[in-house]
Image: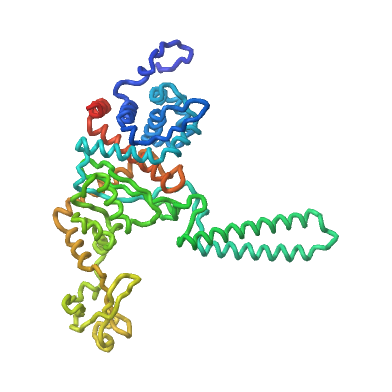
Amino acid sequence: MPIISGDRQQLSIFPPCVDDYVSQDDAVRAYDAFVNYLDWGSLNINVPHHMGRPKYDPKTMLKLLIYSYSYGIQSSRKIERACYHNISYVWLTGNLKPDHKTIAEFRRNNKDAIKNVLKQCVQFCVKSKLIEGNILFADGTKIRANASIKNTWNKNKCQKTILKAEQRITEIMDECESLDQAEEGQASLNKLCGDLADQEKRKARVQSIMQEIENENRQSKNTVDNDCANMRSRQGSHAAYNVQHVVDDTHGLIVNVDAVSDANDSRQFAKQIQQTNEQLGKNCQSACADSGYAHTDNLSEIDQDNIKVIVLSQKQSLHNAQKPFNRGEFTYDQEKDQYVCPQGFVLPYRGLNKQKGTKVYCINQSKHCRECQHFGKCTQSKYGRKVTRLLNEDLKQRLEAQYLEPESQLIYKRRKEEVEHPFSHIKRNLGINAFLMRGREAVKTEASLYAACFNMVRMITIYGGVLGFIKKLSC
């Protein structure tokens, strides 16, 4: 049976020109053309001037990063290796081979410039009418930080560690006192003195961490990456960041990206939509997100800007049947500011719960509840039924009704396929499950790189391939 085999000793004529190494429609040419298109005057690339060996061209270094991140290559050592063995990298760099330290330093020293790449990418999309900015979708996902969850400390963990260290110090002191004077200078005593010093250092270090937590008014702190937080995901609990994406409805392109330390999205909607509107230079018409963003106070900030908010409430997201005698069965009298129960008894306003931001309504006479035929189902409290109402309950009800509008339902139906597509591409196609850099600004730099790379892939597809995209850049 005939087979095809290679011969390493066979002579061949390699193209004499580096430009001939890749075809005209190779994807690497699109990334090269895009970086050349950028406004380098506004990028503010940091190129230090000093004596010694000349620096690599910042355009070449930026091309390396964007092209590598587009294929899920984060490590500077892997990028360096690709410059020797990958023909597209040889073409991209013009046969230059920067080492991993140079690549890592360029990424670390030019965080703001790299984040501006996404901004200029969005500006190009707006100019090309790929982004209209009328309907925006927001969503978040958890991506692991470059830190271990074991390095996360809270007050309880600090107190336990300090107590354990103090107990060990006491034990060591007792052992030292029990040793005979004749044994002074022997190995056993020297070892105990070393253990004592280690425990005292550990105690001082943990006390310092606890003091920092109290001074910064934080719940916890990771000593490796101070900005990350412990978060739960389908893969378990990890030190991670909550990466926020805001996507335009026209072609599903990312307009804004952020990395935050909040484990949930409830306080992020207004911030992310406002940042995106600043990026676009105008307010969108509609902003949409899932129930994780359903915090009425936060949503009101966008609603006040005359933007249609399409976010289902936590109650609407539950598919379970409502329990009997829930608050919805009580009638609210807005003029008298009171509730009336299904049996006709009045629950007047009693006070304000400042911590929860709710108004409290209680029945006048508790005996009405105890003597009611529904006692035990409606309430089991001997003081009678109590009902709470948000301070902005009217706004919440209006937003719930706004979500149920037919037009809103059509927009919300598109949410999942538009805003979750970038996350699936980054996590599944590129295999990105953790950041390499530490600190919120550095992590945001990496997230911006991935967002710009995702937009690049989408634009190449929209324009029918590499040649169509390059032609559009040259217009």
Q: Position of residue 328 (x, y in %)?
A: 21, 72
Up-down relation of residue 305 to residue 257 (above or below): below
Up-down relation of residue 212 to residue 148 (above or below): below
Tell me if I can see residue 17 in this picture: yes
Tell me if I can see residue 377 in this picture: no
State the scheme by which the image is colored.
Answer: rainbow
Which residue is most to the left? Answer: 406
**Which quarter of the picture shows residue 25?**
top left
Q: Nearer the viewer, residue 115 or 29?
A: 115
5 left or right of 375 in image: right
- Location of the N terminus by quadrant is top left
Q: Position of residue 227 (x, y in %)?
A: 44, 52
- Location of the C terminus by quadrant is top left
Q: Nearer the viewer, residue 61 or 113?
A: 113
**Which quarter of the picture shows residue 87?**
top left
Up-down relation of residue 128 to residue 421 (above or below): above
**Which quarter of the picture shows residue 66?**
top left
Q: Nearer the viewer, residue 13 or 206?
A: 206
- The residue under the point 33% across, 36% down is 42
Q: Position of residue 380 (x, y in %)?
A: 32, 81
Q: Nearer the viewer, residue 320 or 58?
A: 58
- The residue under the point 39% across, 35% down is 45
Q: Position of residue 61 (x, y in %)?
A: 41, 30
Which residue is most to the front? Answer: 50
Q: How many circles with numbers are drawn on the protein? A: 0
